[in-house]
Amino acid sequence: MSGDGFFILLTISFFLIGILRAYYWNYASLLVLGSIQYRYASQYLRLENALTQRVSWITFMIMILNISLFINLQENVFSLNHFFKILLYSIIYFTVKFLVILFLGNVFLKKELAKLTVFFSFISDRSFAIIIFPFLVFVYFVPYNLDIYFIYILIILFFIFLSFKIYSIYKIGTNSFGLIPLYIFLYLCVLEIFPFVLVAKGFFY
């Protein structure tokens, strides 16, 4: 992967992660741990305040940027025009997912479930975006014949975080709110699994 634009975007991502490391590390680390262990996620939810809201906004920007860079790795040559298209599609996807979850929460009178679904869905995506940053750096600097291995590692990480997300949402929906598993399965297929399949397909075909 080459291109000055890619390097500039990596620098912006590094700057945002640096802000987290310097001022909000306790919250950021709790956020990442919460994506794989429920008790840390619950602790993060209980700490909800102005600082966690700042962390949420910063990690949201990191998520949009790094996931767009990750998807852009499907191209051998970096193009800013192509990247900004992916960035726009990413923003639309996450916005639509957020609105659909809230809409379903209002329709089924499960606003608390909708809030938790949004949290656990986005906490995985945010954590994934933070974790993959070193790999994006390696992809930029290593020779082309080696960066394909880092791309495979990123796809595996993507699948791991997706699996934790699916498990958390399914567990909360069935155990805490008694939802019919079919409804949860339909939601997961449409808004979580299908986008992953589209992204993975772009790397292999």
Image (cartoon, helix red, strand yellow):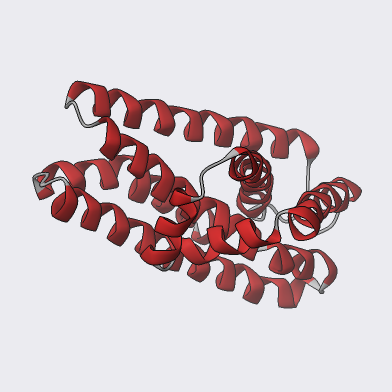
Task: Specify whether 50 is left or right of 16.
Answer: left
Q: Residue at x 82, y 74 (%)?
A: 143
Question: From the viewer's perspective, is residue 26 above or below residue 119?
Answer: below
Question: From the viewer's perspective, is residue 33 above or below residue 117?
Answer: below
Front residue of this view, candidates 194 and 110:
110
The quadrant of the image that shows the N terminus is bottom right
Q: Residue at x 83, y 47 (%)?
A: 12
Q: Position of residue 28 (x, y in %)?
A: 63, 57
Instruction: Tell me which corner region of the image, top left, top right, bottom left or bottom right, holds residue 162.
Output: bottom left
Q: Position of residue 196 (x, y in %)?
A: 42, 52
Q: Residue furthest right?
A: 4
Q: Residue at x 28, y 47 (%)?
A: 188
Front residue of this view, candidates 4 and 144:
4
Q: Position of residue 11 (x, y in %)?
A: 86, 52
Front residue of this view, candidates 4 and 43:
43
Task: Specify whether 164 is left or right of 125.
Answer: left
Task: Specify whether 7 is left or right of 64.
Answer: right
What is the tally of numbered marks visible in this picture? 0
Q: Residue at x 22, y 58 (%)?
A: 171
Residue 96 visible (yes or no): yes
Q: Position of residue 193 (x, y in %)?
A: 34, 51
Residue 77 visible (yes or no): no
